[in-house]
Amino acid sequence: LWFTGLRGAGSTTPAKRVQKTILQRGLNVELLDGDVIRTNLSKGLGFSKEDRDTNIRRIGFVACLLARNDTVCIAAAISPYKAVRDEVRGLHQRFVEVYTYASLDELESRDVKGLYKKARAGEIKGFTGVDDPYEEPESPEIVVDTEAQTPDESAQIVVQRLEELGLIAAEVRA
């Protein structure tokens, strides 16, 4: 399950809620958060296209290892370039892309760290969505609009779609 979207679009929060739901249904699940991976597995990489691609390939590789060992893997990473997302998709028998959307205006208004403001002022170079491209998915399996939906609503959309695709069992209701 691959969450992609611009910084601040809200991938991690719904991903954590989906993870909790999958755990409650008795499946092994791991969340690979892009920020956590950058701090640990990809420490030392910069933000050039090559380094960003390397980071996404690493996440994809770890996800593949987990999946081979019967663990549902949820990745939440900006992953701005379509080609490397497609490359990672090719590693997996079952790959579900979740496009987490919010407008740039909304993202800038949510930006508590002021990163978008710094990027617009030229203080940060190569910032995805400002002076470095984000290539939107062309046909993701799932789209959530975090500008219009709460994190719980976004997570529910993802869970329902996973049930429809037969990737997780539907919730048993008493």
Image (cartoon, rainbow, N blue to C red):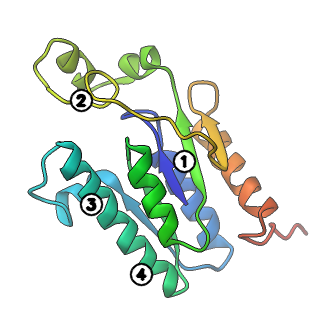
Residue 4's spot in the image, x, y percent?
47, 45
Q: Is residue 43 left or right of residue 174?
A: left
Tell me where residue 33 sits by quadrant: bottom left
The answer, for residue 36, to whether it is visible in the render is: no
Residue closest to the eye, 103 or 147: 103
Determine the CA span between mark 2 and mark 1.
23 Å
Is 128 left or right of 155, judged from the image as shown? left
The crowd level at tag 2 (other Cα within 10 Å; few <14, some 14-19, many 20+) is: many
**Circles 2, 3 touching at the beta carbon (< 8 Å):** no
The tag earlier along the polypeptide, 3 or 4, is: 3
Mark 3 or mark 1, whichever is nearer to me: 3
Q: Amino acid at mark 4?
A: Leu
Q: Dot 4 corresponds to which residue?
A: 65
- Residue found 48% across the figure and 55% down from its top: 86
Q: Which residue is mark 1?
A: 14
Q: Which badge, 2 or 3, is on the more N-terminal residue?
A: 3
Query: Which kind of residue does numbered mark 2 sit on?
Result: Phe
Residue 145 image-quadrant placement: top right
Type of amino acid at the residue the image marks with label 1: Pro
Relative to the observer, which residue lies in front, 83 or 35? 83
